[in-house]
Amino acid sequence: MGVPYVPVIGLVGTDLLKRRDDMVVAPDPFGSGKVSVVAKAMRPDVAVFHVDKADRNGNVSCGYQVEAVILAEASAHVVVTAEEIVDRVTEKDAVGGAFIPSILVDAVVHAPSGAHPGGMTGRYAPDKEAMREYVTASRDDAAFAAYLEKYVFGVRNHEEYLERFVRQAIPA
Amino acid sequence: MSVRNGIAASRTRAPRNDSAGFAASRTGAPRNDGLDCNAEELMVVLMAREVRDGEVSACGALSQIPAAALLLAKELHAPDAELIILNTVFRPFGTSRQFHFLAQRGELGLFFVSGVQIDRQGNYNLHQLGPDLDRPNVRFPGGYGGGMIYYCARRTIVFRTEHTRRSLVEKVDFVSAAGHTPPDVLRLGGPSKVVTPKATFAFDQDAGELRLESIHPPHTLEEIRENTGFDLGVTQAPTTAPPTDEELLTLRGAIRRKMIETDTYRAWAERTLGAA
């Protein structure tokens, strides 16, 4: 949308608001006498997300209907990782709302199985065992540091990650 | 926006004795010895009765009981109800942006939500447990969605599969959505009822408090009092009208089949509906 803030009906009186400095309670500027939450726009510098298909120009099909389109619109720069690089992606190739035109995209990275250990709708299911390991590791800082060392810093590139950690894809 | 009604989810730094049991049961529903159905079937039937014909009624993700309730209502008394069951085939659109603005426009008549804790003032907690906001013992998915819809849907039914003093409390540890707000707050609706396996509470709009509305057989007022962490607001309450044969037969027949055929909480439907 590009607006600096937007009113939202809801959330007044919640503890969520105590934690967020990007949501405040404000009066209706048109004088109804009512108050509501006003949320500050999020404008990320960079958005990175995984998609189904992309072409060399940066046209993208997310693969399914998803909020990535508004994320791409809101962000100054967009990097997509894609399961597959194809000759050409057009709006017709993407199911309703899943098309992102190249004008919004800065860079495309070919990353098959790039959602691992998460799943990719239409291609493969989440790797439950690997997800469990992630959740367990996230319970304390030391365990999580070890996790990052093994899966992120300890691999040279995506190919090595695939080779070492991604088993045969589970059909979605 | 992620609308999660389920409460079994990522838990961090959870002492076992604190979190065990908050996860949804995977072993089928407990019996209700006073009725010819199990506890989850009873909740489905009671929640289905809240659905009105012609309205838009919805539930979020991880919501098998309300999903079944919505389908049952449409089959029985609300053929023209519009249903939104997120993450299933029963949804009119694919993005949560569209669902968000449908709610903001005031088009939702009824919404079903669950909370880890529910308190006397109709606040529910879907975020975290523990007295210190900054150092929770257990964390749940939380969610912005429910905290928005609670103010937008005309009526919200809060349900909880556990009726104990740890789930029905005087004051929630964290307010994910507020039951009552001052009159100057822009709000289109709010809590209507709370449904548990033992009783139904109605939300008194003027007092801003829950009141025991009816007790499901075979439970007693004394039992409800013992297992509820807040004042019931009444000294007696009628018995809940038990599920009729038509309600149970439809649920176990047509609705069970529909859920299996459409892959709508299929495993739950197979395990729970019609289970002894």
Image: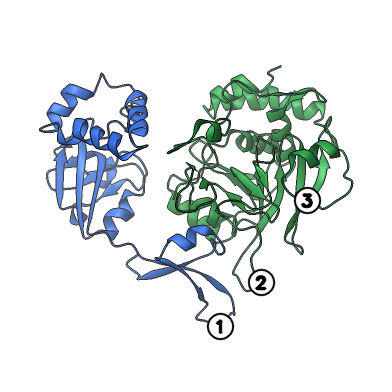
Chain colours: A blue, B green
Residue A92's image quarter? Answer: top left
Which residue is under mark 2? B183
User: In whole angstroms, how far apart are the C-alphas of marks 1 and 2?
Assistant: 15 Å
* Chain of the residue under label 2: B
Residue B272's image quarter? Answer: top right
Q: Could you tell me the amino acid type at mark 2?
A: Pro
Which residue is under mark 1? A31
Q: Could you tell me the amino acid type at mark 1?
A: Gly
User: In whole angstroms, how far apart are the C-alphas of marks 3 and 1?
Assistant: 39 Å
Callout 2: helix, strand or loop? Answer: loop
As drawn, B213 above or below A36: above
Disc 1 versus disc 2: nearer the observer: 2
Tell me residue B192's x, y (percent): 71, 52
Which residue is located at x 76 percent, y 43 percent? B200
Callout 3: helix, strand or loop? Answer: loop
Q: Which mark is residue B231?
A: 3
Disc 2 versus disc 3: nearer the observer: 3
* Chain of the residue under label 3: B
Of callouts 2 and 3, the N-terminal one: 2
Residue farthest along the top direction in this orientation:
B276
